[in-house]
Image (cartoon, grey):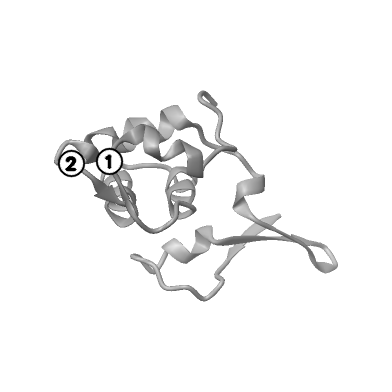
Amino acid sequence: MTTPRSRGATHDSAHADRYDLYVSVGLSGLTECSDPEDDVTTSRTEIADHIADAFDGGAATKHDLIGAARDRGASPEVVAALHRLPEGSYRELRSLWPHLPQLPIEA
């Protein structure tokens, strides 16, 4: 069973910290810790579907992109991927991909 656990960082939402660290728990207790980057469950296409128009007004920050994804009903996996972006401003969608190299184009 995989359950989310916070690293203690503050985020935009009380629920956002659940994307930071996933802890695998077995019958005998804690068995493994893994970074969500190890579990690729979304794609560049899915992210683009939720945030492409966030760039209509120009550059967007990481937090702008997360907010846009949430506003458009993005899955927790999409939001988690956006949380992995470094702080900063992004001029266009393709400027995200060097920071998310593990994501496939299609799921």
Indicate left or right for 79 with 12 as reference: right
User: Looking at the rendering, which quadrant does residue 55 occupy?
Assistant: top left
Q: Are marks 1 and 2 in contact (CB under 8 Å)?
A: yes
**Residue furthest left as drawn:** 57
Q: Above or below — where is 57 with respect to 3?
A: above
Indicate left or right for 14 with 27 as reference: left
**Residue furthest bottom as drawn:** 8
- Front residue of 7/96: it is 96
Give the quadrant of the N terminus: bottom right
User: Looking at the rendering, which quadrant does residue 104 occupy?
Assistant: top right
Tell me the residue at 61%/48% (across/down).
37
x and y percentages locating residue 46 in the rendered image: 42, 31
What crowding class fits label 2: few (fewer than 14 Cα within 10 Å), some (14-19), or many (20 or more)?
few
Tell me the residue at 27%/52% (across/down).
64
Residue on which disc 1 sits: 91
Task: Specify which label sits upstream in the sequence, 1 or 2.
Answer: 2
What crowding class fits label 1: few (fewer than 14 Cα within 10 Å), some (14-19), or many (20 or more)?
some
User: Looking at the rendering, which quadrant does residue 59 occupy?
Assistant: top left
- Front residue of 93/4: it is 93
Amino acid type indicated by mark 1: Arg
- C-alpha separation, residue under disc 1 versus residue under disc 2: 6 Å
Residue on which disc 2 sits: 58
x and y percentages locating residue 27 in the rendered image: 82, 63
Figure disc tally: 2
Amino acid type indicated by mark 2: Gly
Q: Above or below — where is 22 with respect to 82?
A: below
Local secondary structure at mark 2:
loop
Tell me the residue at 60%/39% (across/down).
40
x and y percentages locating residue 76 in the rendered image: 46, 48
Indicate left or right for 16 with 70 as reference: right
Q: Above or below — where is 66 with respect to 106?
A: below
